[in-house]
Amino acid sequence: MITYVLSTISSACIQISAILIAFGWYAIRKGNKERHQKLMVTASCFALTFFIIYMSRTIFIGNVSFGGPKEWQLPYTIFLVFHIILATTGGIMGVISITLAIKKKFALHRKISPYTAVIWFGTAVTGIVVYVLLIVLWPGEMEISMLKAIFGT
């Protein structure tokens, strides 16, 4: 039960972070730097909250395996690996974007941050799909190792 609650909270955090990034992007396009900064810091806090919950759940409790039909296992696994790569890339680029902003290297920040945002939006969308397939439609075995949850071995 706790796995499902934590999954729901962490998924909500990612969705909120993506929405805040969209508003932050809009704010900077309108020239409102102060609003942009506040929105992006808040979005980063929600993303960090997601990461802490996700890693804590993964380390201390485990993950949920795919419980859907066998013929969906391979497409789901491919989709999940794509989501993980997207999320990892987005997370790393997010840290780089934040670091550039803190260091006031705004020319480089302006160059990579739009890509970071688009990747993060992709992460949020694919994350919702994973959540729906894994938690809502076809919940599988709870509290298993991460490798078993991903690859079903």
Image (cartoon, rainbow, N blue to C red):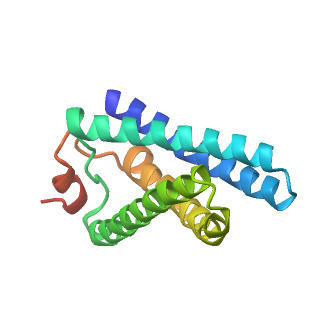
Q: Locate residue 101: give its quadrant.
A: bottom right
Image x and y of residue 106, in percent? 66, 62
> As displayed, is residue 43 above or below residue 120?
above
Q: Is residue 1 visible?
A: no
* Total marks placed: 0
Residue at position x 20%, y 62% in the image:
151
Residue at position x 33%, y 45% in the image:
139
Image x and y of residue 66, in percent? 28, 54
101 relative to 92 in the view: left or right: right
Residue at position x 18%, y 43% in the image:
144
Q: Is residue 147 visible?
A: yes
74 relative to 22 in the view: left or right: left
Residue at position x 56%, y 44% in the image:
44
Q: Locate residue 104: give its quadrant.
A: bottom right
Image x and y of residue 12, in percent? 54, 40
Residues 139 and 16: in front is: 16
